[in-house]
Amino acid sequence: MVLHAHITPSDWTKYVAASDALGGSYNRILPFLLASVPMLDDDWVTLPEVDGRDVADAYGWATARPRVITLGEDARPLWRIVRRYARILGEALPEEQAAFIERTAEQTLRFAACLAASECSERITVEMLSAAFTLVRRSVQDAVRITKGATSPKVKRQPLSLADKVRARIEMHGGRATSSQVLPFVGATAAEVKALPGIVVTVERSGKTGRPATVFSLRGDGSENGGSTETVAESMPAGADSNRNGDTSRHAEPEPASAEREQNRARVVRRDAYRPEPVQATPVPAQEPQQSEPLGESNPFLALL
């Protein structure tokens, strides 16, 4: 009896336990890891037609009467190699893995007998045994790959703590994250997050009527030592000398202009300086040149500059 079934590697490791394999149930199974078939990706390629008449005739020959299929003399040296291969491999592998391949030699002999019966022959040739051994070795390699984690202890992944989750969310948003960006993803309340060490809570408002927003950030080396702060963000007119609380530390004091800047600054000259002097009938004593008014009085835009 032959049972052909498919199972994913993840389900294999989930449902096939090492204790079951040690009982000898799974060394009767030849597992194979399947890969993608490139032929199935090509719509222009069709599978070849198979003539099953020879197989039907071979089945009729095998079941017509009891038959005994034996090894040919040319196949016996290879058969000794197959048995030695199975023994060495069973001793080299861990017990949990060796339990899957204990019947390697027997499986090879069974496949070789099927190949002989398919040709209506009671003798297994070296070619038949070699072909069967190639197939079984492939199954041995795949069985070792599937069960390679059977001997290693299962390492349980430690779940992240609430503090690690909150820090990860804050760092994801550049160091500052609102409550809506943190709380739904960490499964905690605002009070639980506020109680975490190293988390700074800030309540920010936009204007006087805006809804306050809770912002979480990470405490730096020179930040405050806990608690919540409240910040009110209001728009201030450009050029204002002070903020709402009279704090003038945000505005830089005007610095005196350097000599180079003063030299390059555009001069504003009064218009009457270009007017010609009136013609006098009689000479008058020379008058001292009229002093121009200070720059600040003649330039009304100086205050804006």
Image: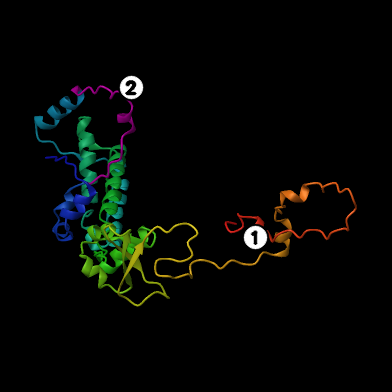
Location of residue 66 by image quarter: top left
Residue 280 colored magenta?
A: no
Tell me the residue that label 2 is attached to: 44
Residue type at numbered disc 1: Gly
Label of residue 32 in the image:
none
Residue type at numbered disc 2: Trp
Location of residue 2 by image quarter: top left
x and y percentages locating residue 121 in the rendered image? 21, 32
Who comes first in sequence, dot 2 or dot 1?
A: 2
Q: Residues within 10 Å of mark 2 (few under 14, many from 20)?
A: few
Instruction: Please state if 256 lies on the left or on the right of 197 as rendered.
Output: right
Q: Main secondary structure of the magenta part?
A: loop
Task: Find the distance from the CA under tag 2 to the CA under tag 1.
Answer: 90 Å
x and y percentages locating residue 73 in the rendered image? 28, 42
Instruction: Please state if 197 lies on the left or on the right of 52 as rendered.
Output: right
Q: Nearer the viewer, residue 152 or 174?
A: 174
Furthest residue in direction bottom, as rendered:
225
Q: What stretch of residues is rendered in magenta?
A: 31-53
Q: Quadrant of the N terminus?
A: top left
Instruction: Please state if 255 lies on the left or on the right of 119 as rendered.
Output: right
Q: Nearer the viewer, residue 3 or 244?
A: 244
Tell me the residue that label 1 is attached to: 296
